[in-house]
Image: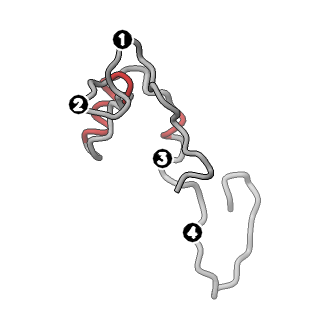
Amino acid sequence: KLPSGTKKVLPSTCRAVIGQVAGGGRTEKPMLKAGRSYFKYKAKRNSWPKVRGVAMNPVEHPHGGGNHQHIGHASTVCWYAP
């Protein structure tokens, strides 16, 4: 019997798990504050927070530096570039 109430008959040769995945809707809940995001990524890898290159200094990133936060050159590559 499935959660919808319907009954399914399966052959005994089938290998299947019937039901819902545990924690299925976990990612749909909003984080709401930075601390939860911090601890989420602390357990995984150092990929948070993502700092933009234009917000960095010129020694830290090619897009950094300048009096305004702009890249200063084209961010895309020409089709005909060697």
The answer to the question of whether label 2 and label 3 lie on touching residues, with beta carbons closer than 8 A, is no
> Pointer 2: what residue?
59
34 or 81, which is in the foreground?
Answer: 81
Q: CA distance from mark 1 to mark 2?
A: 15 Å
Q: CA distance from mark 3 to mark 1?
A: 47 Å
Of pointers 4 and 1, the one earlier in the residue sequence: 4
Of pointers 1 and 2, the one earlier in the residue sequence: 2
> Pointer 1: what residue?
67
Of pointers 3 and 1, the one earlier in the residue sequence: 3
Instruction: Report the mark closest to the observer, 4 or 1.
Output: 1
Kind of residue sitting beneath label 2: Val
Q: Residues within 10 Å of mark 3 (few under 14, many from 20)?
A: few
Kind of residue sitting beneath label 4: Val
Kind of residue sitting beneath label 3: Gly
Residue 2 image point, x, y percent: 68, 59
The correct choice, above or below, for 47 with respect to 8 in the image is above
